[in-house]
Amino acid sequence: MTTAKAFAPVMWLMPMVVLLFVSAISLAQETGRSPDVKSTLYLHATLIDTDRGVVRPNTSLLVRGAYIQAVDANELRGASDVSAVDLQGKYVLPGLINTHVHLAVGRPDPILARAYLRRELYSGVTTVRDMADDARMLGELKREATFDEIESPDIYYVALMAGPSFFTDPRSHDAALGFEPGTAPWMRSITQSSDLRQIIAEARGTGATAIKIYADLPPAIVSALTAEAHRQGLLVWAHAAVFPAGPMDVIRAGVDVVSHAAFLAYQLAPQIPPSLTEMSALNEHGDFDGPVMRAIYQEMKDRGTILDATVDVTYRHPWKKFPSSVVSSVTSAAHHHGVMVSAGTDDDPDWSDPDSALVGEIVRLVESAGFTPMDALKAATIVAARTVGQQNAVGKLETGYAADFVVLKDNPLDNIQNVRSVEFVVKHGISHMRKAYEPFRPNPSASKARSQ
């Protein structure tokens, strides 16, 4: 295996930095890229305002290029340079945001990833947060999505940090092929002697939005990583327990988002497990709304820490260590006590289901965690936008925000299952009709050849 020393960092860091710079400015310049940028007026919609938690009937959106130029713009109906789309009787939501995806499991396959991303878009998902894969593939997919070269949500991704023991996991080897395990800038082994300033700088060079603190690290290192990442302008996303760092340790370290409601319940364990591989089974009869857990929820509320709950995955893939009832109970209690909850799926890149797993997560928040339909939609829009650090750009239907939205035939506030009734999706001002969706079917022989 080629060692990391054989790779001169400047050789690969510079293209990634340029890629990130171009991607970051491309949307901001969208309206100036072409003299014939077109405008569309979407008339008479029932707008579901998840930011304010209200319904705005007979509302119109004026879209110019990739941005919303005006709301309630009915007076522009007759303008000669504006095409009109009548949404009478339709329901409009901000584009949905899936806050926990994995575009590869093990060795990256960009063909499968693009198929998955296309399905997500046609399901109403206009942004995704990838929570640890090969940054080389993710950087290219992000560029393609930013420039609308592929039908895909916009992509934000991480550089993963974990203790050395994690890097015996073969998935970490596949995601950093060509590097010794734990030395790739997006899959980094951390010890007490690590140069965190250099490590975070290299993580930034991969185009990552955040670092992900994954496993097998003590509280002091979790705190030091968080402080350095924030100092260099990266967000910090972490498992809700990093073992041996427990839930309260992780939250007090100041991370921005914690993943997996089940991990919060380890605060009730007699002893915090020493590592991820030594997790004990959770007691499904724990007091998830008692004093110990309420202290966690209060700390999260006070700090603005978001919970990426990943509820539905525990129903889709039951595991004895994480009973579904625990995940639902913790999510429900956290939400009740004012913790911001985002909607993420933690699903594999399976493109074959016609609907995104995010639809199931939104439904699960209502049916198993006690959310109102409006609150579940907030989890997949405005809270999710904050999760990826884009609350000033997406997640709302307001002037100056990205023209990312979903048009539904039926009202999801009457029945949350109606979030499946997608008529069309607009991303960067471009319409994608649901009836035109056909699953992209990768060539099995090509996939087989790549794996040999």
Image (spheres, rainbow, N blue to C red):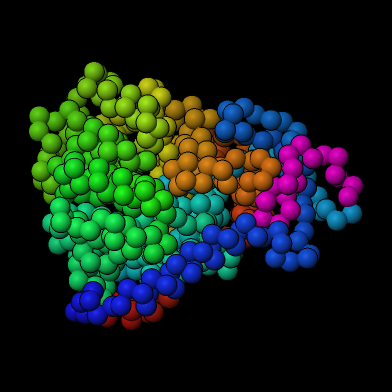
On the rendered structure, is 222 left or right of 411? left
Which residue corresponds to the image point at 57% horizontal and 33% vertical from the top-left? 50
Question: Which corner quadrant of the image does residue 176 belong to?
Answer: bottom left
Q: What is the x, y in percent for residue 126?
A: 54, 52
How many numbered badges does the structure rendering display? Answer: 0
> Taking 303 as reference, is 438 above or below it?
below
> Taking 256 as reference, is 35 above or below it?
below
Where does the C terminus fall, quadrant-wise? bottom left
On the rendered structure, is 169 left or right of 58? left
Q: Nearer the viewer, residue 44 or 318?
A: 44
Q: Nearer the viewer, residue 401 or 107?
A: 401
Q: What is the x, y in percent for residue 406?
A: 61, 46
> Taking 67 as reference, is 439 above or below it?
below
Q: Nearer the viewer, residue 231 or 150?
A: 231
Which residue corresponds to the image point at 45% horizontal and 47% vertical from the top-left? 388
The answer to whether residue 254 is seen in the rendering is yes
The span shown in magenta is: 62-79
Which residue corresponds to the image point at 32% horizontal and 73% vertical from the top-left? 9
Q: Nearer the viewer, residue 396 or 210?
A: 210
The answer to whether residue 111 is seen in the rendering is no
